[in-house]
Amino acid sequence: MKNPIIAALDVPSAEQALKLAEQIAPAVGTFKIGKELFVAAGPDIVRRVRATGASVFLDLKFHDIPNTVAKAVASAVRLDVQMLTVHTSGGGEMMHAAEKSAQDTAKALGLSAPLVLGVTVLTSSNNETLAEIGCEADTEHQVLRLAELAVKSGLRGLVCSPLEIVALRKILPAHIQLVTPGIRTGAEKADDQKRTLTPREAIKAGASWLVVGRPIYAAENPRAAAEKILESLN
Ligand code: C5P
């Protein structure tokens, strides 16, 4: 079975990221590089993490005109990432352009196309946030609506909160991969994640991949924490 743990390298420098990656690599399948690290360390950090043999999830949540997103996706494919994110609220045409660019660029380079993941409603948003920007739907309906649009536009995966997994699994084709942050083991301090599941619960509910940040990188012993999560899945 593939290792479903994606460890978030949510640290501010290349040195810290590479040190953490080296520490936890044997217990983790993929490393997530997000905005903090990418803006500080640039595409070179993607190449350096890839050079260790690990898979990379580039979480930059693209949202722009379709042509610009397609070009950004092509650049990400050239960095040989295995997963990347776009905002589904960018619309069907934008998502279609992202997926097509991933497929076409990968084919031209002889690589496997990365999984383009759609981000629906951010977990930091609530009904008031949606109303503020003119969206009358509640978050639950908006998540389902954007998820269906993503699938219709050709995406093969979505990022979703732990509490959305079951509802999404009910309406989505089985091949759609669900990537779930908000994972907590119970061993860590409470933080800003309010809707959480344990790794085992999330996989049981239908998650394909688990994004784990603080429970690994903020642990006293990140390697032991990652190993414990992996063991809890077996
Ligand atoms: O530290 P923690 O495990 O909460 O980190 C979760 C990771 O997943 C972070 O990199 C965060 O940006 C990301 N994420 C999230 N909730 C979302 C989407 C992404 O926590 N809805």
Image (cartoon, rainbow, N blue to C red):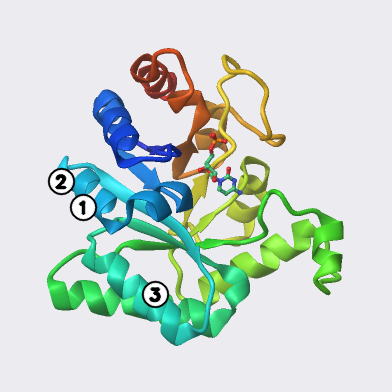
Q: In which quarter of the image is the N terminus?
A: top left
To which residue does mark 1 refer?
47
Relative side of 154 to 16, left or right = right
Residue type at the position of mark 3: Glu
To which residue does mark 3 refer?
99
Q: In terms of sequence position, does the residue under pointer 3 or pointer 2 come before the other?
A: 2
| Residue nearest the viewer, comparing 165 with 88 | 88
Q: Total of numbered circles in the picture? A: 3
Q: Give the secondary structure at mark 2.
A: helix
Mark 3 vs 2: CB contact within 8 A: no
State the separation of the CA atoms marked 3 and 2.
25 Å
| Residue nearest the viewer, comparing 193 with 198 | 193
Residue 64's spot in the image, x, y percent?
53, 78
Mark 1 vs 2: CB contact within 8 A: yes
To which residue does mark 2 refer?
51
Mark 3 vs 1: CB contact within 8 A: no
Relative side of 159 to 208, left or right = right
Q: In which quarter of the image is the C terminus?
A: top left
Q: Is residue 181 visible?
A: yes
Residue for point 61% across, 31% down: 197
Q: Give the secondary structure at mark 1.
A: helix
Residue type at the position of mark 2: Ala
Residue for point 81% across, 60% down: 129
Residue 123's spot in the image, x, y percent?
68, 49
Q: Nearer the viewer, mark 3 or mark 1?
A: 1
Residue for point 50% across, 51% down: 178
